[in-house]
Amino acid sequence: AQSVTQPDIHITVSEGASLELRCNYSYGATPYLFWYVQSPGQGLQLLLKYFSGDTLVQGIKGFEAEFKRSQSSFNLRKPSVHWSDAAEYFCAVGARGSNYKLTFGKGTLLTVNP
Amino acid sequence: DTAVSQTPKYLVTQMGNDKSIKCEQNLGHDTMYWYKQDSKKFLKIMFSYNNKELIINETVPNRFSPKSPDKAHLNLHINSLELGDSAVYFCASSQEFPGPGVVGANVLTFGAGSRLTVL
């Protein structure tokens, strides 16, 4: 079965600083990988996804993520964080061997200081 | 607005009661899901339906019974509510049932959630 680890429970950055949120997955074949963002009291919104092809994927709101098979990672990055980026971020993996259902990581809470 | 909508947004009830949460999507998607998010924000899939047919049924107590009257609706009924059922329940939908070559699969659109509190 697939699994996802987000090592950082809580990250605090200053507005304008760069950001990297870590995600490691466990799956025997090529996974489908996703990043979702959840603002307080809201549902989850898709930021970006990786299915195949170019390992650097661009998403909404200026986010990007890079799939590194050798490291089993799919880290999320943003060059300059805005206060509105404060939210909970979830990495997820979907895999063929489990009816393609998504398995989510436990999330990383991002706090942005002014 | 095209969306996934859930009702009610908040639900406070006593242990032992029976309650339902409703979900509707007007995105024309074929697949719908229920996810449970616990107090530590951990999201876990409960059920998945494709065109009214149950596809995924995780190890969820029998007290939870999903019902899909048509592919645009997926309701969740919970019997004999327990304290541990307190959580936020998210409905979601995706364009197609996940499968080989189905690129659009797994791109979920989520509702805003229904926060259930059992006292």
Image: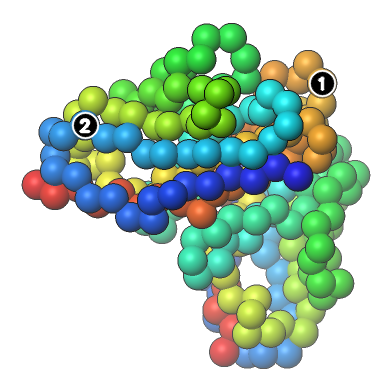
Q: Residue furthest top?
A: A53
Whether A82 is drawn above or below A50: the answer is below
Amino acid at circle 1: Pro
Q: Is residue B105 visible?
A: no
Whether B82 is drawn above or below A8: the answer is below
Whether B67 is drawn above or below B99: the answer is below
Q: Count up the numbered dots.
A: 2
The label on residue A94 is: none
Q: Is residue A101 visible?
A: yes
The label on residue A18 is: 2
Left or right: residue B15 compared with residue B40: right
Q: Nearer the viewer, residue A25 or B17?
A: A25
Q: Residue at x 52, y 29 (%)?
A: A71
Q: Are marks 2 and 1 on the same chain?
A: no
Picture coordinates of residue B66 (x, y %)?
A: 81, 60
Whether A69 is drawn above or below A72: the answer is above
Q: Residue at x 70, y 42 (%)?
A: A2
The label on residue B100 is: 1
